[in-house]
Structure formats: structure tokens, C-alpha cells
Amino acid sequence: MSQGDFKRSLKEHGSSVYGEHKSWLALRVDFPLLLLLLLLMGIGISVLYSASGQDLNYVKRQGVFMGIGMVAMLVVAQFEPRLMQRWAFVVYIGGVGLLIAVVFVGAGAKGAQRWLDLGFFRFQPSEVLKVGVPLMLSSYLGLRVLPPRFKHVSVALLLILTPAILVGIQPDLGTALLIFAAGFFVLFLAGLGKTYLLGALFFALSVTPVFWFYLLRDYQKTRILTLLDPQSDKLGAGWNIIQSTTAIGAGGSSGKGWMQGTQSQLDFLPESHTDFIIAVLSEEFGFTGVVCLLLVYVLIILRGVIISINAQSMFSRLLAGSITLTFFVYIFVNMGMVSGILPVVGVPLPMVSYGGTSIVTLMLGFGMLMAVSKERKRMGEQL
Amino acid sequence: MSDFSTLKNPQLESRLYTARASFSLLVVILMLGVLLWRYHDLQINRHQNFATLADNNRILVRALPPARGLIYDRNGVLLADNRPSFTLSIVVERSENLDQLLSDLGELLVFKDTELARFEKLVKRRRPYESVPLRFNLSEVEQALIAVNEHRLSGVEISAQLIREYPLGQELAHVLGYTGRINERELRRFDPGRYKGSHMTGKTGLEKFYEDQLLGEVGYENVETNARGRVMRVLERTDPVPGADLQLYLDSRLQKIAIDALGEERGAVVALDTVTGGVLALASMPSYDPNLFVTGISTKAYTALTSSPAQPLFDRALRGQYPPGSTVKPVFGLAVLDSGAVTMGYRIYDPGFYQLENKEHKYRDWKRGGHGSKISLYDAIVQSCDVYFYDTGFRAGIDVLHDYGTRFGYGVKTGIDLPAEAQGIMPSRDWKKGVRGRAWYPGDTINVSIGQGFMLATPLQMAAAVSRLATRGEVHNPKLVSRVGNKATPAVSQPAITEIPDRYWDLVLDSMVGVVRDLRGTARRAVGKLEYTMAGKTGTAQVVGIKQDEKYDASKLAKLQLDHALFIAFAPVEKPRIAVAVIVENGEHGSSTAAPVARDVINAYFKYYPELLETSETAVEEGNALGVPPRLTENDHESG
């Protein structure tokens, strides 16, 4: 590819394709996805208002993050997927470089070194890799004959494990897991053979003891042990899980009502506006609320899968598919850990948990999804 | 790039992708199913369970301690009040780190080891989410220090409780007693439900005796708290029921007069309403300030009280056991007459001593040289002749003395509404056999006949006995409390002493009048002129035994070895309203030191309640036998 591709695409979307529309509609936007995301943001903001104890500062800042995320998404959506494929390598190398920088000059928080202090804001390089890894993997495998051969699988694994391990030793188990998952999904969607899958499973089982005894830190072990028996340490590590399952269960079928959840409003629920916000929603809106939220999520996932299936290149398919499945991993891990079926790892609930980084990262992903979805029409016309 | 793309098969890869994506979607839906199953399980199947857990988290049942009942005297003067006191407590469950919290608190307030030890003990025994007291009676400065640092003292609470205050201080210490913090023994004994939220209980006196009535009923409130234990709102409340107020028969003015009359002396004054048995004054001096005990007395102050030779903590009126001495003579006079041992006209010769037949031992009269010849019962009581009672007591025998003494309440608890009343001793053959393991000797009877020897009585028993004399045998248990809340407490009366003929009563009571009125009456000079009629009897209780031929010489004895002075009295004679017993420890003679105290109390009583005298004057006009001058009565005896 050359610079010419990008210039041509810009020219085209300005003239031939959308010529009959008004200029603002000329933006490449997937409207079903945009509507679903706006709906999700609305749910997120209202739950956050309650979870933060009616603190408008949180709501305002979350609104700003969402705005930034929306702009980022729309900007990314305008790029040609082929251009992304070309520049993926740069993003990936840059991300890994920053991760290595973190090891040397990073700022710590809660015993983990994750941040780069850039003076005006603190930045988590691992977030770059959440986008960078699927980009890189899709870019690499999209050009290969599929299903991938052993050589390509090996290179792909190297590409996945390097950043995943760098993030894992920070230690940030949640993000490492998401990075690994994003890369693995690309491999899987690219048609990774059954032998490899079984081998990976066997390998995973065999390295578990190594993980347990050499790689996991004490607090990580505690989280896993706590999952098995939260009552063993009621006021320590088990407290979060006991309080969150209590909040969820107390919600019942229809909930206690908005801002009426006693567990969160009376501060029994820890991290209620960040990682544990689903417990607030569950307590205040009940099982009905949970089902509604999941429905929105499922519609987004369905839309993502449809976009990916209809994508015009293997790179686009793999990228869109990986982004969509990673989005689901967020949901599953977060809701699983808060309800006590998974160990507590720091994974936010997408678009609902408070936090700028995760929202912007997610929206960048959705921007790529939109870019892919619009590629179809252009390619269709071209073909 | 082009090398690979030439080998790629777009259709095949697209189908491969679609298959993998569909499979992934299937897995996604299955995993969503797992999430839904989990949330359904928590929110629908186990909802009740978690709803309860959430409520237990936030709803704290707080006990509301009731206000303790107040205590008033007969005229509504407040004797025991409640005042607020602030307590620092900790809810351990709400503190993040108890040791850290205690050390943070230690920077603000200085804690004694004993405080911390008690706290640790209570922490082990607490119910979950119960606040455990650490420091009582916070000063305003301490409260402010805690309030300012509240943000970093998670789990700390300051609560206000009402604690006791006794406005009259030491004047009523022995009557009211005091409240104090519940100790371990009480904690085991008490119903924990009733004492939830209360740290105080009655330790002695009325506070202890009427604990059940004064305590009240604990209230409850369900409060919603946040995770740090701060109360957000009250959900439900059952108000506590305050304890019942007590009203006493006691008149605080009379009590004050009794105490003032005792002055610097050690002793006790008991004044009873002869009609009801109500206690009008009950003083034991020296006394102590009960307010010191309410918030916990310092070891130093407590040691000072316990080690004082004057024994201020000792309630002499209720627990002091003294030989009643000559104050028993009217009772034994009735005994020897009514038992038929001697007749009303019986007279003796008193050479100053009494000897049993064939015995060398001389039982001395208090008056060297004796009271002379022809001593009748009247003379014996008026002049307090010992030999008359040696003689007649011996004739009647110990069984008779024991029988009548017991009927007048000696050796029997009076049943007053105060804890730990002493029983005294009315000796008998059985008693000596049981306690001393020896047979009864005639000499024992001689000693008992003048209220000495083995015989012991409390000032309260002496007052109860004189009240029975005054009313010619009515037996009312002395009682302090007249009303509990709105209900009058029933008077407790025992069967009256009925079988003694009026003429014996007349003689004995007339002679008691003679004690204060007759020219030779032992208390005439000490009592002086009165605006009403009074009957009395002096007494002297030996502290050290005097050897056979030794003379009692006060100047040779240390103050603590001097005789105790006793006086019993009632008034007005025609229609008795008040009975008084006074003991002045080491006061030597009942006449000089004890009688004026009794007179002052009775004077004051009729000054405050003159209407009680008016009725008695009517009685005089009606020609009551007791109103006749004593001389005539003696003539009657001669004729009888």
C-alpha cells in the first residue's frame, strides 16, 4: 500500500459515495452501533450518578471522557482499514516500547507499576496494547494463508505474549488477560487448528502450577483463594465479594429503585463506582435491570459480529471479530468477578464503570469497527 | 505481500471466518447464559437470604437506656437526680484496625491500663456491632478532641447517658446508697436484655433495694448506618419506659437536723412514724459523698474512706450492733409483769449491787451505793435501776426475756426496705448452745436483763422497739418508701402484741414519761422543757468490761473505749406519732449526749408538722390515762 490509498479514500468519501448526502452525514458512522453505544452511555451515566453517591463531579468527568471517546471513535471510523493494517506495526512497536519504559520509569499505584506520568496526565501504556495487539495480529495474519501454519502461529504467539507478559509483571492481571484474549481471538478466528487449541489447553494446565508458585503475587493468590471461600476472610479480601454478592442478591427481581440501594448508598460496597458498579445496578434495578443491560451488550456484540462477517478483507474481519469478542470478555470477567464466580481482577464494566482510559480505549475499538463496517460499502461499489 | 495474497483463497477464508465467528457467538451466548444463571440464582433464588444480609449490614438495633427513676423525700425534695454524662465507646466491627484506632485515641486522650484492660475484657464478651465503652464521663475538652478528629476515628462513638447525682451528698448516703458501673459478678447475674444500654446499677441502699423499680424498661431503635457506623436515619423506635420515681417517708429537713444534732459525734439516729412505720430520718455519721462512687471513685479516695477509724462507709443505723443497755428496761418491765414473775407492786432494796444466792460475784448497779429501798418498777425505769432488773429478770428467767424481747423485735430483722440489715442478738438457751456451744448460766440472764452481755441490737431495732412500746404493741415494719411511681406501697404490719393488759402498759409507759419529766428522771435535765409530752429511756452500752471492784472512770479511758450513749423516745405520749432511737458512740451517758439529739429531732418534727400535736391535745381533753401526772401513777401502784 502507499500514501495514495489514504488520499484516494478521503477524496472518494467526499465526492462519489456520499455525494447526495449533506456533509455531516458524509461521516462514516454505523448508526445501529452508535445508537446502542449512546443507549449504553445513558445507562452508564445514570448508574454512575447513583453509585458515586449523587456526586455530579464524577458524572461530569465521565461525560467528558465519553465525549472524548466519541470524538476518538468518529475520527478512527474515518480511517481506511487498509491504512490501519499498514500502520498497525507502528502502534504495536510503540506500545511495547512504552511498556518497557514503564518498567524503568513508571509510577506505582496500589503496589503495581502501570502508569507513565507525562506531566499533564497519567497514561497507561497497556491500554495501547489492548488496541495494538489485535491490530498487529490481524494485520499479520490477514496477509497469511489461513488457517495459519506453525511458523505463523509461533510468530503470532510471540506477538501476543510479549506485551501480555510485560503487562502481567506490572502486575496488571486484568489487562494482561484482555490483551492475551484479544490476540488469541484473532488467532482463533483466523482458523487456528484443533491441534493447537488442544495443545494450548494442555500447556495452560501444565503451566498453572508454575504460575501459582512463581509468578502470582500474594494479593493475586488471595483473590483467587477468596473466590473459593469468601467467608474465610470476611473483613479482608472476602469483604468485597461478600458485599457485592449481597448487593446483587438484595436487588431481587426488580431492584430497590434508583439511588435506593442500601449496600452502595451506605458505602458497604467497595469500588462501587468503578469495577463493582454492576452490583449497584443489580441492587437498584434488580434482575430486570441486569437482563436489560445484557440485552444492550448482546445487541452490540451481534452488531460487531455481523460487521465482522460482512467485512471485505481478512484483516478487517479478524480485527472486528477480535474487538467484539474482547468487548464480551470485559463484560463476562467483570460481571463474573463481581458476582463471585471469577477471581477479582481489575476489569471494568464497559461504558458503565467510571474511568476515562477504559472508555477511550473501548471507543477507539468501536471506531475501528465502524471503519470496518463502512469499508464494506466502499469495497462493494469498487468491486 | 503479493506473494501471500496470490495463495489466499478469499471464499474459503471467508467461510472459515464465518464458521469460527459463529462458533464464538455460540460460546458467547453460552457464557452469557452462565452469567444470567448466576445473577438469577443470586437475585431470584437467594434473594431473601441476601436481602436479610443487606438489612443486617445497615440496620443496627440500638438499645435506648431508660432514665432511672428519681427519688424524692416526703415533701417532694429531690434526693437522687439524673445528669448527662458522656461516654466514649467503640464498635469494633466498624473500626478498620482496632489496635491502630486505640493508639490514635491514645494520642488524644491518655488511657489508664485498667481502662484498657476492662475494655479488652468487654470486647471479648460483646455482641456483634455492640458499642463497647472505653472512657466514661468525658470532659468537654475530651469531647471536642474526639469530635475534631472524628474523620480518622472510624468506629468511635460518643454517647450521652444519664448518671446519678445526689444533691444532698453525704446526708443521705447510707439511705440512698449509690449507683455504680455494673461489675462482672452482676453482669453474670443480670438479665442482659434489661440492662442493654445501661452501664449502671444500684450498689447499696435504696438504689440497690429498689433496683427493679428504678431501672425502667429498655427501649429499642432500629437505625440505618453506613459502612463506617454512622447513623443515617432512625427506621423504627420503641421508647424506653423510665424507671418509677420513689417517694420516701423521710423528711430531708429532719434528717439534716438529726445530723446537725449529732455534730462531730459518731452515731446514728433513727426516727420512725409510729402510725405507719415510715422512716422519718435515718442518719449514720460520719458519712461519705455518694457522688464519688457514681463515676468511679479513685483508689486513693476509697482507701481513705475504708481506712478511716471513724468508718464513714459503715451504716451504723442499719448494721451497727450495740448492746441496747438500759433502753430494753421498759420491754423487760412488761416481760416480768406479764409473765407473772412479779406484780406491779413489787419493790426491791438496791444496795448498789446484786448477788445470786450462794455466789460471791456482785452485779453492780451503775449508781455506786444503789438507789436505796422500796424501788418499784416505776422507780427502776425512771432512775434506770439495774438491780431491780437483775432481780426481776432472774426471777422471770431467760426464756421469758427472750420471748418478750423477740416480740419487740430484738434479734429479728425489722424488714426495712434496705439491703443487708443486721439481725442483732436476742440471746436464748438455744442460741448460746448453738453459737457458743455452752449451757446457759444464771449470770448470763443477769447481764441480759439490763441489755448487756450477749444482747445486741441495731439502732433501727431499738427505734422499732420503742415504736411498739408507744403504740402498745402495734408492729409495723420500718419502711422508707411510701410511693413507687403512682402506687402507694402497702404498709407491712405484723400481728400486734395483744395479750398484755393495759395496766402494765400504763405503768411502763408512765415510767418512760417519768424518765423525761420526773424529778429523778435520768433524762429530765437533758431534755428540758417541752411543748408536748414525751416518753423516753436512757441507756449506756459498755464498750469495755469493768472489773469487779474497779470504778468506771471516764478520764482513764481513751475516747474509743468510752461507753456508748443511747436514748429512745416517743411523742406525744397521748397519741404517739414519732419514735426515735439515738446512739452516740463513746458518748458516755444516754442522758447527756443522746437525749438532746432525740429531743431536737422530735422538736423539729412537731415544728414542721404542728397538726400532729393538735390531735393529741384533743386526746388530752378526752382524759387519756397517759396524760395524768407521774406521781399519781406511783400512788396507784402502791394501791395496786
Image (tube, rainbow, N blue to C red):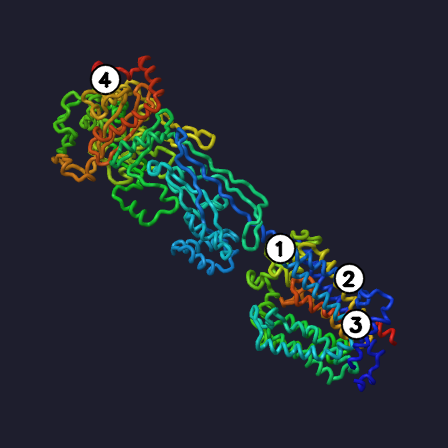
B334 with respect to B350 (left or right): right
Please rate how many residues cluster around mark 3, counting C-alpha atoms within 10 Å: few if below 14, some from 14 to 19, many from 20.
Answer: many
B108 with respect to A367 (left or right): left
Name the element at disc 4: helix
Residue at x 64% of width, y 56% of height = A56
The answer to which of B43 and A106 lies nearer the viewer is A106
Q: Chain of mark 3?
A: A
Residue receiving disc 1: A53
Looking at marks 3 and 1 on the same chain, the residue that comes earlier in the sequence is marked by 1
Residue receiving disc 4: B630
Residue receiving disc 2: A35
Gap in angstroms between the C-alphas marked 2 and 1: 28 Å
- Tell which tag, 4 or 1, sits nearer the viewer: 1
Across and down, in percent, residue A51 comes to 64, 57
- The three-letter code of the residue at mark 1 reads Gly
- The three-letter code of the residue at mark 3 reads Val
Please rate how many residues cluster around mark 2, counting C-alpha atoms within 10 Å: few if below 14, some from 14 to 19, many from 20.
Answer: few
- The three-letter code of the residue at mark 4 reads Pro
Residue receiving disc 3: A372
Looking at marks 3 and 2 on the same chain, the residue that comes earlier in the sequence is marked by 2
Name the element at disc 2: helix
Q: Are marks 4 and 2 in contact (CB under 8 Å)?
A: no
Name the element at disc 1: loop
- The three-letter code of the residue at mark 2 reads Leu
Residue B399 lies, with reference to residue B36, above or below; the image says above
Please rate how many residues cluster around mark 1, counting C-alpha atoms within 10 Å: few if below 14, some from 14 to 19, many from 20.
Answer: some
Gap in angstroms between the C-alphas marked 3 and 2: 17 Å
Residue B383 lies, with reference to residue A29, above or below; the image says above
Q: Are marks 3 and 2 in contact (CB under 8 Å)?
A: no
Gap in angstroms between the C-alphas marked 4 and 2: 120 Å
